[in-house]
Image (cartoon, rainbow, N blue to C red):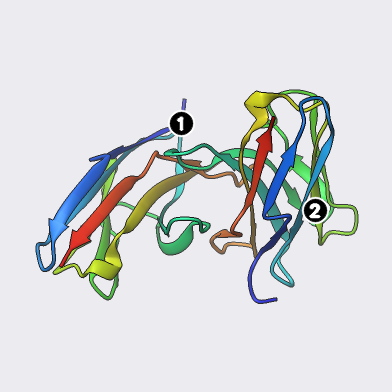
Amino acid sequence: EDQVTQSPEALRLQEGESSSLNCSYTVSGLRGLFWYRQDPGKGPEFLFTLYSAGEEKEKERLKATLTKKESFLHITAPKPEDSATYLCAVQASGGATNKLIFGTGTLLAVQP
Amino acid sequence: GAGVSQSPRYKVTKRGQDVALRCDPISGHVSLYWYRQALGQGPEFLTYFNYEAQQDKSGLPNDRFSAERPEGSISTLTIQRTEQRDSAMYRCASSSPGQPQHFGDGTRLSIL
């Protein structure tokens, strides 16, 4: 069964304290791995798509990496405005479905 | 509008009533998805459409749930004979081929 596990469930950082969020996945065949940011009361906001092991994507203080079993979201020198829930999702290859399978998210709090 | 629009934002209804939730996707997006999100969890897939064709309804929990997209644009998710366990945030997303899914801010459904 396709599955996504995120860790830690919650993370509290001081402003400027870099860290990484983990997303482990099992999927029959990976079409894509997605990172989203979700603010309270809002829908998930797209950040990155990764397609193959070794791929990396960057946006401001965020960098996403992918291996055959997991993805990391590295946050460099975070600011309070980076506080949000970060969701990881996979899309399986094969079949007609484009559905995303999400993890439960990591709640990040960055304190000034 | 520029993003995915869902209405109503909040819906409170009594157990046993039918409810209809509406999603207006981003203009031109071929694919439309429905998800359900419990508090502290990632979105859980319900169903999706390409144009007006329902491609995958494997996530609909039972036959009280149905969805349609008759003209390939706006979609309605209908829940008949609602039960308290149906209370959740219902999210809609849309995408163009090969592009990531973009989410709306959801409809919060509460069943009394």
Q: In which image quadrant can residue B112 be found?
A: top right
- Corner quadrant of residue B56: top right
- Cα gap from disc 1 to disc 2, whole angstroms: 27 Å
In the rendered image, the vertical position of residue A93 relative to residue B63, given as above or below:
below
How far across and down, in percent of the image, does residue B67 sit? 80, 41
Residue A52, x across and y down, in percent: 35, 53
Of the residues shown, which amino acid type is indicated by label 1? Asp
Is residue A51 left or right of B38 when viewed as pictured?
Answer: left
- Residue behind mark 1: A2
Q: Residues within 10 Å of mark 1 (few under 14, many from 20)?
A: some
The answer, for residue A57, to whether it is visible in the render is no
Residue B16 lies in what quarter of the image?
top right
Identify which amino acid the numbered label 2 is placed on.
Ser
Q: Tell which of A26 and B69 is nearer to you.
A: B69
Q: Nearer the viewer, mark 1 or mark 2?
A: 2
* Quadrant (top left/top right/bottom left/bottom right) for the C terminus of chain A: bottom left
Residue behind mark 2: B75
Residue B88 in the image: x percent, y percent?
60, 37
Is A94 in front, or is A86? A86
Counting other residues with Cα less than 10 Å from the Cα at mark 2, is it few (<14), some (14-19), or many (20 or more)?
A: many
In-front residue for pair B16/B89: B16
